[in-house]
Image (tube, rainbow, N blue to C red):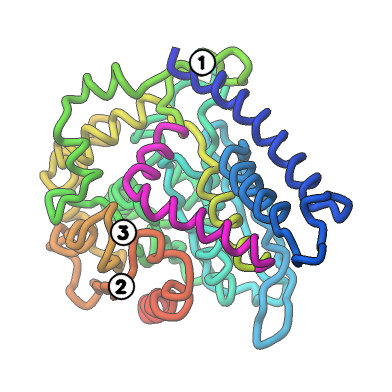
Amino acid sequence: MLYHAYELQRSWLNSASAFASIGVEMLNNPANPFNYVGPMGYMNIGPVAASALEVFAHATASYGKPAWNLEAIDVDGKPVAIVESTVVNRPFGDLKAFHREDLPEDAPRLLVVAPMSGHYATLLRGTVERMLQGYRVYVTDWADAKTVPLHEGTFDLDDYIDYVIGFLEHIGPDAQGGGAHVMAVCQPSVPVFAATAIMNRDGHPCTPRTLTMMGGPIDTRCSPTSVNDLAMDRPIEWFRHNVIATVPMQYRGAGRRVYPGFMQLAGFMSMNLGNHMISHYEMFKHLTVGDDESAQATKDFYDEYRSVCDMTAEFYLQTVQEVFQDHALPNGTFLHRGKRIDLGDITQTALLAIEGERDDISGLGQTRAALELTPQLDAGKKRYYMAEGAGHYGIFNGSRWRDKIAPVVEEFIAEHG
């Protein structure tokens, strides 16, 4: 019933959003009497009402999967075209490839592993755009679980690890016989860390040269946040019975059990509800004074932020239990296909842990723990960076990412490439 109730509400809000958009057009029409300029001056009623309706229309609209829109980037003051392609297609996630047209064939390869946590991989558009300056960039483009038919089977943490290893195998070793560089943003830090241990253990020819983990929940016992507390305060059965829903019949994945993206979004919005309300009020003020550029910046952010997708129930529940409740990876009890993951097997891949000073999703120390859990890796292959003033989103997007954090990543890759 949960999903059906949401769909009913979404249908109503879509209609309300459409009517509000029509109202905006009518109120902004020069022939509107509320825009009349008489002896007393400009009434200003029309633009104010139109601005309010525009904010409402934007806040209640439905958002599908965003496009990457990476057609060109600025390199030394000149636009350079970007080539985009899908190089691997699998039921629960594709591998996307991006590169500059003028990039040398032997340029370093970087696999960016996007979170499977309710948002699409396009949330990392700013991350990818910055790294395209000097790398051939590959991105995991995870599927919306409600669009994957039941006959494609299940998808859990084991499958996630297998997908990452498979994607690295497709990218392959370079001319020197080494694997690609890898960047895991937030949630995938755990399964990618595990995949790295497996590939080091097996002497895999595509073992990552470097692994950068950004704001990842490696050990959530360090500086626990409200997200961690929620997972710890309730037994796994509570999550199974209260946040898991069945995909309705109108979707290709009808009948699949999922953790809906709209629930994840509601949780994130409620964590900083005051800030979101202020952002929309500021957007209203920008619209009323005709500052369309500032208003559009807010719209662009929320267009991406509100675009959410579902996760399979088995992946979500296993993540809650293994990562947040049992702390399986730091405790040495994490299994892949029934075999224990030993982080001590990591002896080749250089590790960079990046955290944000004000991260309210993955607290300080949670990612840095990875460096302490790899006793057999030479200290010269480990580095830690704390981004001052950065929140969770600011680690991989925005000016701090572009100007402060990305150069650290590039330097680390160059040192161990």
- Between the C-alphas of marks 2 and 3, the distance is 14 Å
Q: Given the image, on which type of amino acid does mark 1 rest?
A: His
- Between the C-alphas of marks 2 and 1, the distance is 41 Å
- Residue at the image point whose x is 54% and y is 56% from the top: 301
Q: Which mark is drawn over residue 389?
A: 2
Mark 1, residue position: 4
Q: Which residues are magenta?
A: 262-291
Query: The N terminus is located in which quarter?
Result: top left
Note whether 56 is above or below 255 in the view shown.
Answer: below
Q: First in sequence: mark 2 or mark 1?
A: 1
Image coordinates for residue 364, horizontal then vertical, percent = 20, 62
Mark 3, residue position: 215
Q: Is residue 188 visible?
A: no
Q: Given the image, on which type of amino acid does mark 3 rest?
A: Gly
Note whether 394 is above or below 30 in the view shown.
Answer: below
Residue 274 located within the stretch drawn in magenta: yes
Q: First in sequence: mark 1 or mark 3?
A: 1
Is the residue under label 3 in contact with that under label 2 (CB below 8 Å)?
no
Furthest-bottom residue in this view:
76
Q: Determine the image quadrant of residue 63.
A: top right
- For disc 2, the neighbor class at 10 Å (few under 14, some 14 to 19, many from 20) is few
